[in-house]
Image (spheres, rainbow, N blue to C red):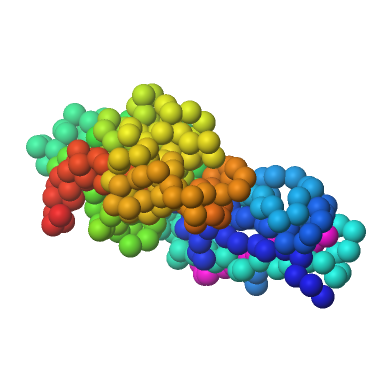
């Protein structure tokens, strides 16, 4: 049986967001000498559930000979899923000859932490404690009054959706829970929407804190790579004031953190000096410092982005979300683009270092 398809993924592992979602991009190449109608299916590994996966594109399409096409798998792991490492892969087959012309892609792994629900879960009880008069006395007294009136306080269940003054009922596995918003008084991070409490200040967001996994970044944060370190920064779509607050390193014109996967529809979705390229990726123009070929619009990096040598150029345009490198179309991970962007953004790097210092972490 001759090989019919090549299947490749951007990375060998997929990191889920704090909400248990993720996205994986695959390239499928028809290596046959004739076009073929192919069918693509997602094959869950042991213990993984088929309903977690959604193929974004139509599962059947025409694949021209020697051409690569992109397929995107969206992943959503429901809250309460048992922790562990799971895998999945793509199967590609010729619709006309599925038993003899097919290919199994490499397994892609992802980790469900122990657990994404528990890491941000909260106790279902609250004890009223003596509060010093120097810690937001007026707000604390209103919360105590609400508690005496029978209204749920911070950390208490809210089955009917109702909480005491200054609190909001947040959905959680097994029912809602009353949590305080940023700036409200607290005794522990488990009482805060943000997931973090600073004594004497109230509920806050620990931007710049060191992290190793998503579980280290509570509430609205995600564990982001920032060149030589991993720090807790705001997830995409969260309100922001500065670029250095966001995992995408871009607080857009609407004052929300931009998407962090490097994709774009226009230049407005890219942090300058990056531009939205022909394959809908935020890449750097010639003359900008770079670390990898994929970060450049030209597909060629020699300390700075430069005009690509003829040997690097591709015979035909590359599909969306890929770059032409050494004559081949390579899928590009948003993390690659974000890291290269930081080389050209000393103000953002300085802002991240200042936040790390504020969290007591040496830059």
Magenta span contains residue 90: yes
Q: Can residue 90 be seen in this view?
A: yes
328 sits to left or right of 125: right
Residue at the image point whose x is 65% and y is 72% from the top: 46
Residue 232's x, y, as percent? 30, 50
Work out whether residue 333 or residue 187 is closer to the camera in this orientation and state it: 333
Q: Position of residue 170 (x, y in %)?
A: 45, 40
Position of residue 345 measured from the top left corner of the image (x, y, whole percent) = 25, 40
Give the side of residue 219 with respect to residue 159, left or right. Answer: left
Q: Dividing the image into 4 quarters, which one contains the N terminus? A: bottom right
Q: Please determine whether, in this image, residue 286 is positioned above or below residue 326.
A: above
Residue sitting at 46 percent across and 63 percent down?
113
The residue positioned farthest toward the right in the image shown: 96
240 drawn magenta: no
Image quarter where the C terminus lies is bottom left
For this orientation, the residue located farthest to the left is 134
* Residues shaded magenta: 83-94
**Residue at the image position 76 percent from the left and 65 percent from the top:** 4
| Left or right of 261, for residue 81 | right
Q: Is the magenta stretch mostly helix, strand or loop?
A: strand
């Amino acid at each position: 049986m001759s090989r019919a398809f090549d299947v490749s993924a951007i990375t060998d592992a997929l990191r889920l967001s704090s909400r248990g979602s993720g996205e994986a991009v695959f390239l499928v190449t028809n290596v046959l000498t004739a076009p073929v109608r192919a069918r693509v299916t997602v094959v869950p590994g042991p213990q993984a559930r088929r309903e977690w996966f959604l193929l974004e594109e139509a599962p059947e399409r025409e694949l021209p000979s020697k051409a690569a096409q992109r397929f995107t798998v969206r992943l959503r792991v429901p809250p309460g899923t048992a922790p562990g490492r799971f895998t999945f892969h793509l199967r590609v087959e010729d619709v006309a000859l599925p038993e003899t012309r097919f290919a199994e892609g490499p397994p892609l792994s992802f980790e469900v932490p122990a657990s994404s629900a528990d890491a941000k879960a909260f106790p279902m009880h609250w004890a009223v404690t003596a509060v010093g008069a120097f810690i937001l006395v007026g707000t604390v007294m209103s919360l105590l009054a609400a508690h005496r009136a029978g209204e749920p306080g911070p950390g208490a269940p809210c089955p009917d959706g109702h909480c005491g003054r200054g609190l909001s009922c947040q959905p959680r596995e097994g029912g809602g829970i009353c949590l305080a918003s940023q700036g409200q008084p607290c005794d522990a991070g488990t009482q805060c929407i943000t997931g973090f409490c600073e004594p004497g200040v109230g509920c806050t967001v620990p931007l710049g804190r060191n992290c190793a996994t998503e579980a280290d970044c509570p509430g609205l944060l995600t564990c982001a790579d920032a060149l030589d370190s991993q720090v807790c920064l705001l997830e995409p779509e969260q309100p922001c004031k500065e670029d250095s607050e966001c995992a995408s390193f871009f607080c857009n014109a609407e004052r929300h953190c931009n998407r962090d996967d490097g994709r774009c529809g226009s230049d407005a979705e890219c942090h300058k000096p990056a531009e939205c390229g022909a394959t809908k990726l935020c890449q750097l123009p010639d003359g900008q410092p770079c670390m990898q070929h994929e970060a450049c619009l030209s597909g060629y990096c020699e300390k700075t982005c430069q005009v690509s040598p003829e040997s690097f150029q591709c015979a035909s345009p590359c599909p969306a979300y890929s770059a032409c490198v050494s004559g081949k179309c390579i899928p590009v991970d948003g993390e690659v683009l974000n890291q290269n962007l930081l080389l050209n953004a000393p103000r953002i790097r300085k802002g991240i270092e200042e936040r790390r210092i504020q969290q007591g972490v040496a830059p």
